Amino acid sequence: MMAAAVAVTAMTMISCDKNGSATLKDGVDSLAYDCGVFQSEGLKQYVTMQLGIDSAYIDDFIKGMKEGALNEADPKKEAYLSGLAVGKDVQNMAKSLTQQVYGDDSTKSVNVKVLIAGFEAGLKGKDGRTAEQAYNDFNAKLQPVREAQLLKDFGDNKAAGEKYLAENKKKEGVKETKSGLQYKVLVEGTGALPTDTSKVEVNYEGRLIDGTVFDSSYERNMPQTIDMSMPGVIQGWVEVLKMMPAGSKWEVTIPQNLAYGAQNQGPIKPFSTLIFTIEVLK
């Protein structure tokens, strides 16, 4: 019992150095101190691995942590410290927006100061637009900016598709619609034409203009059913299916603007012209 008492006394007499904030006066202080020590390992990993703070600046982190923990009664200070934390998120948001706008071009980046100015205007109610209006404006501006960058990266792909379409429409049996979609009848169907409310069962194979097959229901041995009221397929498919009587089998060449446009769909790169063999089963 004497040894235990000595140990407790030793713990309660521990004091922090001149940079510390408290002296351990009793067992509860000692408990709190031990809690900080054993939690520090997890905090260290969080600080270095999650927050990305260099261990060389641990003293600066500790200074900020103390300010945050010891000034809870100061709402002005609390607001400032919260702003510092959110500022890191804004920085990451700028990186994400840079990726959306400029893709893999590491020589360009979104101006963080301009992004912050937008936040400030919105928070203070100085912009005049609702959040929904600003969101719609953002999307309207993002698309052409993103497409302009993608055209730099995939302009050759777009040009190759346009060349292919120009040559393909000269081939025997190939017809072109007003939208620019091209098709060739392989088997003339005699069944009903699909309507906006039909459910259409099809087999198909999709290829790039270089012949690469990127999808095939034939290979899966699993026809696909398309609900024309909610088709969930590219625009070119919606157009052509309404032209194909049941029992038809066509070769369809779809310009990029009626396919995935500027979207990157794995093997289907932005601005890809696509070729489909489509068979309407019923």
Image (cartoon, rainbow, N blue to C red):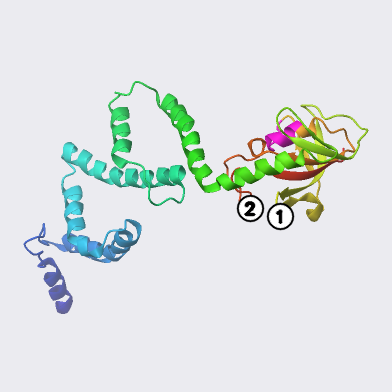
Q: Which mark is residue 212?
A: 1
Q: Amino acid at mark 1?
A: Thr
Above or below — where is 9 with respect to 266? below
- Disc 2 is placed on an element classified as loop
Q: Nearer the viewer, residue 218 or 272?
A: 272
Q: Residue at x 11, y 60 (%)?
A: 20
Locate residue 263 relative to residue 210 in the image: left or right.
Answer: left
Where residue 23 appears, x then y in whole percent? 9, 61
Mark 2 belongs to which amino acid? Pro
- Residue 273 appears in the figure: no
In the drawing, what numbered circle is on residue 267? 2
Graded by Cα atoms within 10 Å as few (under 14), some (14 to 19) or many (20 or more), the crowding at tag 1 reads: few
- The quarter of the picture where residue 72 lies is top left
Q: Which disc is residue 269 wearing?
A: none
Asked whether 253 falls inside the magenta stretch, the response is no
- Viewer can see residue 68: yes
Label 2 with label 1: CB-CB less than 8 Å: yes
The mark that comes first in sequence, 2 or 1, is 1
Image quadrant for the N terminus?
A: bottom left
Tell me the mark number nearer the camera, choosing from 2 and 1. 1
Decide: is 99 above or below 193: below
Magenta span: 230-239
Give the camera-side residue of 181 and 173. Answer: 173
Seen from the viewer's position, the closer of residues 229 and 81 is: 229
Which residue of the protein is positioned furthest toward the bottom in this rendering? 3
Q: CA distance from mark 2 to mark 1?
A: 9 Å
